[in-house]
Image (tube, helix red, strand yellow):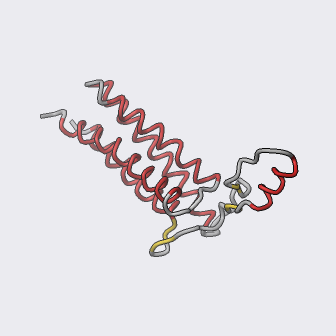
Amino acid sequence: MTARPLVTANRLALLIPAALMAGALGSQYIGGLYPCEMCHWQRWPHYAAIVVAALAFATSGGTRRGLVLLAALLIAISGGIGVFHAGVEYGWWEGITTCSSTVRPTGSTEEMLAQIMNAPMIRCDVAQWTFAGISLAGFNAIISLVGAGVVALLAVKR
């Protein structure tokens, strides 16, 4: 019975980043909300957390606990990046990146220049979508930090 909280933690460590990535990718490919550079920064720790949490299912005991705690840390890192990004969007502080584009130009120099000039610029300091005043970066911060805390608490529970 002592492994039950760890199993739950492992499931959550996989489910939380997978659900957040499904939402992010869905909003991008279905909703047309293209990610800025800082949006991409938030995704990388989630990708890593998914891999680590999946690997944890193949282990047991202390190794599993360690991997689940690592996944919780990765989820929290994404949440921390989300806090920073949301702060940039809300104007609380300056960002450290420039705007980004969705285009990867190809062809001749003239064709590439035309593609770049016609591509939408994705600003890191402007929220593309909000609900109840909270941007997607804000939701990632809230869900990731709370989720990481729950996963960590369950992982250390004996």
Q: Is residue 140 left or right of residue 158?
A: right
* Nearer-the-camera pick, 9 or 38: 38
Q: Quadrant of the C terminus?
A: top left
Please, which residue is most extreme toward the left here?
1
* Residue 29, image x, y percentages: 52, 56
At a point 72% along the width and 58% down the height, the residue shown is: 99
At a point 76% along the width and 62% down the height, the residue shown is: 118
At a point 29% along the width and 24% down the height, the residue shown is: 59
How many labels, in total?
A: 0
* Nearer-the-camera pick, 125 or 19: 19
* Residue 128, image x, y percentages: 58, 67
* Nearer-the-camera pick, 8 or 66: 8
Q: Is residue 116 left or right of residue 86?
A: right
In this view, 81 is above or below 124: above
Please, which residue is most extreme toward the right here?
110
Q: Is residue 66 left or right of residue 116?
A: left
Q: Quadrant of the N terminus?
A: top left
* Nearer-the-camera pick, 105 or 127: 105
Image quarter of residue 108:
top right
* Residue 34, image x, y percentages: 59, 58
* Residue 43, image x, y percentages: 52, 47
In this view, 146 is above or below 131: above
Image quarter of residue 84:
bottom right
